[in-house]
Amino acid sequence: MNTKPFQKAWWAALVLAGLLLSPLALAADAGADPAFKAALAAYSGVGGQVDMDKAHQLFQEAADQGNPLAILWVARCLQGGRAGFALDPEKAGALAAPVLAPVRELAESDSRAMFLMGSACQDGLGMDRDEAAARQWYEKSALMGDTLAMGNLGWMFHHGRGGPRDLEAARQWYGKAAEAGDAAGMMNLGFLYEKGLGVDRDEAQAVRWYSEAAERGHPKGMFNLGWMLENGRGTDTDERRAVDWYFMAANKGEPNAMNNLGLMYETGRGVSVDLKQAAQWYARASELGHANAMKNLGYMFEEGRGLVRDLDRARQWYEKSAAQGNAGALYNLGVLYQLGKGVPQNDLTAAHLFTNAADRGNEDAMNYLGWMYEHGRGVPLDAAVAAAWYEKAAGAGKALAMTNLGSLYQSGRGVPQDDKKAVLWFSRGAEEGNAGAMCNLGWMYQYGRGVEKDSAEASRLYLKAADAGNSVALNNLANLLRRGEGVSQDHARAAKLYLMAAEAGNSKAMNNLAFLYQSGQGVEQDLRAAALWFGRAAYYGDTTAMDNLGVMYRDGEGMAADDVKAVFWFRQGADRGDPSAMNNLGWMYRKGRGVEKNDAEALDWYTRAARAGNDLAMANLGLMYIKGEGVPQDGETGLIWLRKSADQGNDSARRLLEKLAGDTRSEGS
């Protein structure tokens, strides 16, 4: 469709109606329109303060008077959601169509019209987008002294839009705009200095220019200055002043500042912790489409921080943020699906979301995706792929991934077994403050894996990890205290540490604490308390505790003897692979305690336990072969199992072997 006749018809109609100046009158009077001039000053901050509310009002006022430059400015604001105008590209196009032709005529000599033509070309306002033409119009306008054009031309050079990227040219044009008093030029010049683009990196200069822009009321300049103050970049750290600048920027509609204000209130930096305020600022930024704020608001709903916990609304905000490609929201959404929080549990969906987040550089997602591959959750079981994702996450600084990668090297899953590399990754994780890495590194020192054995260093690392709340380290440190390895033996302190770890849910500590109550080491002997803690540990899945609880039921320690319950707990442990429980279950079958006597079952469980390395089971199995119980008598096989048991230090097997050897000599004499 040919729009030129349509545009000219509109132009003529407006002139005849007295709503638009004629081209000749326009050349003389449009730029002199007081409302229009004041609107430009309020928009740029030249000669005063940036005031977008005032610019909005004055642009609209001048447009209502028929000024074509103002009409195109309003269209420009609608096209980009600028100066408080709601984003409305359709309305922008309709408004721009009748005035593009006269503005184009005026652009032969008027720098403000040239700027508007550049903007129309850049935004595709009433025409096809043409960034090369936009750069040309901006350059013409800038050379005639238009400060807004200087800033936009600098931006085109900065980002390589409409032509080659040229950071030196960007610096020059931003500098000219800044020197002319344009707040956006000041802010952009500060950005170049902050990042070292086209200039030597100079954060102090960045602060200087951000301050200039902020003092003129530029919202993003205020935000950037606040960020520099918050993080001590180019100036001393001052979180209180950072909050002040964030607050001023937020009240001017800057969503980045709203989001950061939320973070400051959530974490208590520069202000007292106020989770309701944090949630309110996240909500304000979210309504403006800020992806990070949407993610943060989702988290507040997920955890019930400053808001009533609402997993459905958490999911909704995560989805909105994820739709914008926010990696953190993709990760958080993946966690909801992996754990089944507020959504049906779905490992496939979780793995898909983690992959998308990881591909966008989210190190938490890389680590979690590694875990998914390590355990075959939603993806094929593949320890090598797991190691690759852990390594990517570790390279991005994720301490937990360093720990996980170290564990793979320690066990040789997905990578060649290498204790030294395990120590390397545990050390890196520990340096980053990961308590699990400290604990694992302590274990390597305790047993001399990849490092020289050093119980004192193991104790130090366990203590450091324990101070960080790691229950495994608490349990391991208590083990050292109970045995006196690298530290003075102290059963009482060991009992206290076991209790702390047990109360944190560590099942091994529960079992160990029960052992102390059973033996009266570090605590007063209390068989009922021992049975209680063995029971708790068994409930949490500790197979050693299942076996120990079975023994207490079998022997009537701390409770009435109950062979049926003993068999139940021995079977629970045996079915989960505990060799001692297998042996004890075999013994119950052999003796007919709690179950019908069954030598074949006894033999089966003894065999499983013996193959798993249990020396008692080896001795029991040997006797069954020698006596022909549940199996054809086979003295040779019986002796083999007895020797294996004796080699592992079983005194009963050793004495039996000596007796059998003596009996053999007597028969031969």
Image: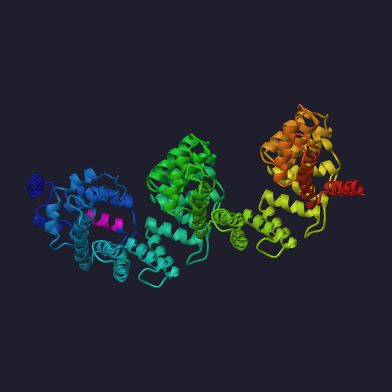
In the image: residue 337, left or right of residue 630:
left
In the image: residue 661, left or right of residue 328:
right
Q: Main secondary structure of the magenta part?
A: helix
Q: Nearer the viewer, residue 559 or 245?
A: 559
Q: In the displayed structure, would residue 94 be above or below residue 455?
A: above
Q: Nearer the viewer, residue 456 or 47?
A: 456
- The quadrant where residue 405 appears: bottom right
The stretch of residues the image draws in magenta is 34-43
In the image: residue 25, left or right of residue 477:
left
Percent position (x, y) of residue 244? 48, 55
Residue occupying the far front of the picture: 669
Q: Nearer the viewer, residue 300 or 80?
A: 300
Q: How is the image coloured?
A: rainbow
Residue drawn at x 54%, y 41% is: 305
Percent position (x, y) of residue 99? 14, 50
Visible in this render: residue 443?
A: yes
Percent position (x, y) of residue 318? 44, 42
In the image: residue 600, left or right of residue 200:
right
Q: Nearer the viewer, residue 501 or 315?
A: 501
Residue drawn at x 55%, y 50% is: 267
Residue occupying the far bottom of the picture: 200
Percent position (x, y) of residue 583? 75, 39
